[in-house]
Every structure is written in structure tokens, then in C-alpha cells.
Image (cartoon, rainbow, N blue to C red):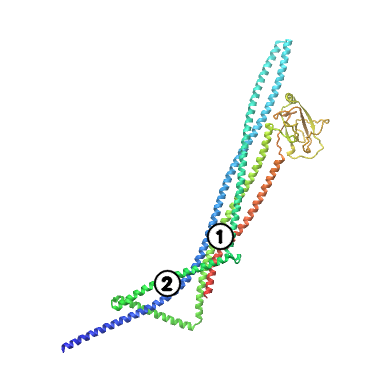
Amino acid sequence: MASSCSSSSSSLCDVESLRARLEEKDQILRTSAQYGKDLLDQNRELAQSIDDTTRKFTRQLEILKEENYSVTQRLEHKERMEMEYQDEIETLKKHLGSQRDEMKVLNELRDQSQLISELRYRIRELESLLDKSNLDNKHLTSVVDSHKTQLEEVNSRLSAVQEGKTDTEEVAELLKELQSIKSERDESNSNCISQQSQIDHLTHQLESYIQQISSLEEELTYANSQLSNMSNSFMATTQENQELRCEIDMLRMNDRDHKQKGNSMFTELDDKRQEAEKKLLLLNVKYESLVNQYDLGKKQISKLKLQMSNIIRMASGQVDSNHVTELENQLTEARNEIRYLTLKLSTDEVKSVAQPLKSSSAVQETDYKTVQFVESLLLTKDAELKAMKKELDERRLASTYNTQQLNDVQHKLRNIESKANQLHAQNIQLSVKLEDFKAKYEGDSRSDTRLERGRVEDIPNFDSSTANALLGADSQQGSASWQAVPQPVGETEERDEHSSDVSLPTSSDQPDGVLSNSETTPRAGVEHKADPTQSTHLPQTENKSPTRPRSPGLYFKKELKSPMSSTDSLWADGQVCYCTGDCLSLSTILSCFSLLVCFCLMLLFVYVKHLFLFILSLFRPIFYVLGPVFYVVRPIFYVLLRKKQNC
């Protein structure tokens, strides 16, 4: 009996222990099931919140993508503008370099012109020296002739003395005079030889200077032609560049608004492009949202797996008491939060039922949030617009500075062209003067119809006897007769400054007449007496134009019987006259006039072109302002349209 009682008591203890264990396991299972249920509820709430956040995120992403697209387009536009400005700066640098080269060429031309002026001055000095040497030579020849006459007289006297056998004293005196005269003659001959050598040296120098002037003039003409070609090419290239820029701007403006082209392929392509871009943006946003959802789902699944493993451990009794206490604390906190939220919901429902107007105010608050968002967008766009305006102002200032520099350079070019034309005119005048000098000193043949001008000079201490002696010396080469020709006093018309030198018909080698001063009053110390029996008019050739009216005065006419050398000058009572030959032909005047007309037409063309370009440059900043404004306003319209569609 005792054994049976002990066995029954032991079996009862085992059953009770098993029951206690079962109850513990049931409690653990219940708590784990409750934990799982709470976790599932939390997961559902989290999934809903994640869906809401993904929707909001997708909307915000769409807005940001649109803004990013607009910003990228603006950046591309800015980059294009910067590239255009860089191209313009490079072209301006190239133009400045070409203008510097032209300035160097002009400086070389100035140096050459200075050399030409120095050579002219030297030529004038040499001419004056030549004239002086000619005068000295003539004077020495006259002295030699007078010595010859004196020698002849002395020889005749000696012959007479020898024939008459006069006193020895007179013979000795005559011999002394003869020796002195011979010594003087030798000195005069040596002086003549030295003067002749000086004249030859000066003529050689003059020829070398003339050759230098001709070479420099050729270089000047070549440089002027190069400068004109460069300036023409520069103007043509600038005009082509400006026309191409205007065409590019017009094409860009036409490409921006395809509506002007009508129902063409351009509008269809543009619409399809815009639709494809919108679809691409939406697909990108959806793809990113799906990727995010997939990542979140993965994370949730991993969390659920961890939770299930924890629950299984708790069910199997392998969980630590610390971990269980932490989970219980978390559960209590979650329950408290749920109670607090339920209380809040109930109070909110009561308030919404009691005050239905507050619901409309809440809706207005949501609308107000959207309005605030749009206003913030507008503020950002305004700030960007201000920055763009600042950049536009800076670029306008830079463009005005560049235009000012261009105007200055063009003004310098005009001055340079005017100087070049002046140099060309001076070169023409110099060529004419050179031809006259060549004709004067080389003895070229002139036409009979050429008008020569004369100039009268007074020689101090020069008597009529010396003039007659000189004329006697010249009579060996050819005889000449002088004749005073008075001018008619009845003509009262005045002449200008250039007509002060009176012209006479010329022969092939030497002018036929010697001219007096054209002033109405005779010079001091010279008596002008006219013979009334002689003719009162000068002879004229057949081809010569009628002479102009002259002021009253005395004119000398010389009738040559034999030609004289071009270096001989004509002598009269206290006066000498020699020709200067500085009259311009009609062809040179016409060429100068045509050059002036061409220069004026060129200046007018340049002025009209710059006016047209200035008008185009005024309209250019308007186009530059309208483009970025369109790019800034477009996303705002997209946002407003989206909100209307959602409503």
C-alpha cells in the first residue's frame, strides 16, 4: 500500500509539473502571438506610411526633375552665350592684332615720309648750291672774258710798243700788267675747274637722291596698296561676320517658336519630343520609386524574419529574460502611443463634428501650403532672374565697351585712310615736281603749248656794262635782241596769287621770253620805260589758249637766233629772270578730284554700314532677355497645370 501511495503521489506531482509547464508554454505562445499581431499591425501602418511617402517623394521628384531640366537648359543657353562671347572676343583680338600690324605699317610709312622730307630739303639745298655755282660760274666766265679782252688790248699795246719802239719803262709796266693778268687768268681758270667739279659732284648727289626718292615712292605705293587691300578685306570680313551673327540670331529665334511655321514637320517633331521627354521623366521617377519600394520591402522582410526568429525562440523557451523585458517595455510604449493617438483622434473627431468650418480652414491650410510652395518657387525664380539681369547688365556693359573700342579703332582707321590719301596726293605732287626738275636739269623736250612761269631777282651792284659784257660773251654762241614790251593799262581785272607769274610761249630747249615782276608798281632802283612805237602784245602760238588779263607793268621779250643751254640765265639792267616750271597739268587735277570723290563715297558707305550695325546691336539684348525669361516661366506653368489636373 505504501508503495502504491508513493507511486500515485509521484505520478500526481509529474502531472502537475507537466500542467504547469503547459500553462507556461500556452502563456508564452499567447504573448508571442500578441507580439506578432502587434508587429503585423505596425508593419501595415509602416507600409501605408511608406506608400504615402513614396507618392509624395515621386511628386517632389517630378517637380525637381522639371526644375533640373529647366536649369540644364538655361545652363546650356548660358554656355552657348559664353561660347559666342568668347568667339567675339577672339575675333576682336584678331582685329586688334591686324590693326596693330596696320599701325606698324603706318609708322613705317611715316618714317619713310620723314626720309622723303629730309631728302627734299637736301635737294632744295643742292638746288640752291647749284644755282649759286651756276651764278659763280657765269660770273667767272664773264671775268675770264673781260681778262681776255684786257689781254688782247695789252697784246695790241705791246705790238704797238714793239713796232714804235717806245720807252723801256712802258714796256716793263705792260709786261708786269701782262704777268698779273696771266696770274689772275690762271686763278680764275683754277676756280672755274673747282666750281665745275663741285657742280658735277652736286649733280651726282642729286641723281642719287632722285633715285632714292623714286624707290621710296615705289615702296610707298606698294605699302598703300597693301594697306588698302588689308582695310578692304578687314571691312568685308567684319561685315560678313556681323551678317552671319544676325542670321544665326534670327534662325535661333525662328527655331524657338515653331508655331509661326504652321502645321509643318517642325511643330510635330517638337510636340513629339516634348511628349517623349515627359514620358521619360515619368518613367525615370517611377523606376526610382519602384527601386526604393523594392529596397524597403527587402528591409521589411529581413526585419520580419528577425522578428519571427525571435518569436520562435520565445516559443521554444530559448530567449533570455533581459530580451523579454526589453520587448515587453517596447510593447507597453507602443500601447501607450496607440492610446494617446486614439484619444487624439477622438478629440479631433469631436472638434470636427462640433466645428465643421474648421475642416474648411484645414483644407485652406493645405491649399495655403501649396501656395507657399509656389511662392517659394517664385521667389527662387525671381532671385535667379535678378542674377540673370545682373549678368545681362554686365554683358551689356562689356558689349558697349567693345563697341566703343571698335568705334575708336574705326575712327583711327578713318584718320589713317585720310592720312594715306594725303600722302598719296603729296606723292602725286612730288612726282609732278620731280618731272619738272628732270625736265629742267636733264634738258627734256617740252611741248610748245606748255606755260612757263618766271621770277625776277635784283642783283646788287650789277651794272648794265656787266650785263652787256655777258651778252657779248653769249653772242659767240648765238645772238639775241632784247625788246621792252609794255603791258596795256586799260585792263583792270585783278589776278590771284598764283597768277602773279606771267607765262610766255616756249621753244623746245629754252623759253622765248624773260619775264619781269607782275606787280603793278615797278621795283625800287629800276626804271621801266616802254617804247610806244613798239608792239603792245606778246606773241601767241596757235594751240595756246587766250591769255588772261594782266596788271600794268613792263615785260621783256627776247628773240633768240640760236638755241641756248638750259643752264644759261638771262641778264638785264639790274635784274635777272629764270624759269621754275611748276605748273600742274589738267590730268593730275582730274585724278586728284576723282580720288577725293572716291574717298568721300567710301566714308559715306562706311557711315551707313555702321549705322545699320548699331541699330541691330540695339535690338540684340531684347532677344537675349526674352530667351531666359521664357525658360524661367515655363516650369511654373507646368506646376500650375499639374495642380489643376490633380484637382
The furthest residue to the bottom = 1
Q: Which residue is mark 2?
A: 293
Disc 1 secondary structure class? helix
For residue 488, the mark is none
**Mark in the foreground, 1 or 2:** 2
Q: Position of residue 198 (x, y in %)?
A: 63, 27
Count of numbered tags? 2
Residue at 43% of width from left, 76% of height from top?
48
Disc 2 secondary structure class? helix
The residue closer to the viewer here, 261 or 172, is 261
The residue closer to the viewer here, 172 or 335, is 335
- Label 2 neighbourhood size at 10 Å, few (<14), some (14-19), many (20+)? some
- The answer to whether any part of residue 412 appears in the image is no
Which image quadrant is residue 85 in?
A: bottom right
Kind of residue at badge 1: Leu
Q: Is residue 559 above or below residue 425?
A: above
The residue closer to the viewer here, 18 or 632, is 18
- Label 1 neighbourhood size at 10 Å, few (<14), some (14-19), many (20+)? some
Q: Position of residue 568 (x, y in %)?
A: 71, 28
Check contact, mark 1 vs mark 2: CB within 8 A. no
The furthest residue to the left = 2
Q: Position of residue 206 (x, y in %)?
A: 63, 32
* First-in-chain label (1 vs 2): 2
For residue 392, the mark is 1
Of the 4 image quadrants, the one containing the N terminus is bottom left
